[in-house]
Amino acid sequence: MAKRAVVVGLGTVGIPLALKVAEAGVRVTGLEHDARKVEALNRGEYPLPGKEPGIAELLQSVRKTGRFEATADPEKARGADFYLLCVETPFDHQRHEPDTAALRGAAEAIAPRIGHGSVVVVESTVAPLTTENVVKPILEKGSGLRCGKDFLLGHCPERVTPGKLLHNMVNVGRVVGGVDAEATRRMIEFYQLFVKAELVPSDARTAEVVKTTENAYRDVEIAFANEVAKACEVLGVDAFTVRDLVNKVPFRNMHSPGVGVGGHCLPKDPLLLAHSVRGHVDAKVLLTARAVNDSMPAHTAKLVEQALKDAGGKMEGAKVVLLGASYLANTSDTRNTPSEPLAEALEARNAMVVLTDPFARELGHRRIEEDAKKALEGADAAVLVTNHDAYRDLDLAWMKSAMRRAVIVDGRGFFDAARVRAAGFVYKGVGRA
Ligand code: SAJ
């Protein structure tokens, strides 16, 4: 049974992980270079934006046990049984390669502190072969120990999603991939401490491919829906009706078309997978799907331009309100949100863009208006970007009176087209006839 664990990187994955491991009776040191987060956590405050059900209570109860401490001092990472690396692993779009700086930094920080029998687990999503080709050499060099002989190494990709961090951590199955069988065995034992769902023993490389594939698969499915949506617009057919009818056919699961694909998983994981086979496999499907999904914000901007024309207006000088800044309904997470490229495409056509969101407060340099009604006052068009539940209560009659032009563009098949048109709006939408 593990006595001590070190979690490197206290973010959306590292914090719930550290707390669940500490709750299970293990003494946990959270290693984090952001002093603000360290101080907040040691004060019992959850330092990230957004509401995560159960996390504040868990932080309080774990603090009482004295089994969790956050620190910026890597020296405090010495002598643990388990080391869990939960740092960011972005894709560098300029250099067209994974940015492993944070992962390498984490491995370098713990390497001199791991000991005989330590188990190091990469939880971050990585390009296949990264665990063996990037992390393993750094650990061996920095510790003078041999992987497989003195310490063990593996990959157990996290499967959390904003808004359900704790729930997924406990109830979503995991692939547990050791670099060798002994690592897999020790890792399974460890994750059984707090994961109630299926733990599938595998190997590190398979786990890396499963994780990047599960998200690449979803990205391709969404791109398929988006391409069908563009066709439906031309054919004068409703893509959401098509989707529902197609999905009545057994073994079909057509996804929802939309204004774009955001988040920290789908925009990146296909690129990690494609990169790992560059020079051997030309990952046309993965990269074309990425391009189709990335084309949706600009496509939506064209719909706005057309709708304004149909309403007798023009994009130049129009006030366009984006309903939703976060990438996912009912969360405040704005990572890779389609709202940003959409705002840029509209501003490139000299529209004046106002962002509103019930949860997210800032997006890069843009301020976000919390009150949708305030944002909509005098607007020439409203664009539904994020299908927040809060937008179900929007009163169309009020909007018609408050807006300067009655134009709605629907990025998520969110509104009932007939009802919006009956309320006197010019209505267009992704995939809408
Ligand atoms: N989206 C569409 N059409 C769809 C589904 C999603 O346009 O049919 C868009 C969303 O609006 C969002 C983006 O794609 O902008 C991503 O949505 P998501 O539901 O995939 O949410 P994520 O990014 O949080 O995905 C995570 C992933 N989980 C992990 O990486 C552990 C994903 O594999 C899960 O399927 C997803 O959560 C989930 O279902 O909760």
Image (cartoon, rainbow, N blue to C red):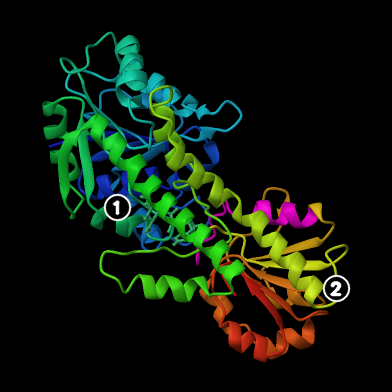
Say whether residue 38 is left or right of residue 363.
left
* Residue 98 x/y as whole percent: 48, 29
Q: Quadrant of residue 353?
A: bottom right
Q: Which residue is mark 1?
A: 169
Residue 105, horizontal then vertical, whole percent: 45, 23
Q: Nearer the viewer, residue 322 or 79?
A: 322
Quarter in which the N terminus is drawn: top left
Please determine whether, in this image, residue 424 is positioned above or below residue 428: below
Residue at 82 percent across and 61 percent down: it is: 351
Residue 156 badge: none
Residue drawn at x 18%, y 54% is 197
Q: Residue furthest right?
A: 317
Q: What's the residue at 38%, 31% (across, down)?
A: 127
Left or right, 49 with respect to 423, comes to left
User: Which residue is located at x 39 percent, y 34 percent?
Assistant: 273
Local packing at callout 2 (Cα closer than 10 Å; few below 14, some 14-19, many 20+) is some
- Magenta region: 328-347
User: Is residue 342 shown in magenta?
Assistant: yes
User: What kind of residue is marked 2?
Assistant: Gly
> Is residue 168 inside the magenta stretch?
no
Q: For numbered disc 2, what is the local secondary structure?
A: loop
Residue 250 image point, x, y percent:
25, 69
Disc 1 residue type (three-letter): Met
Q: Which residue is mark 2?
A: 313
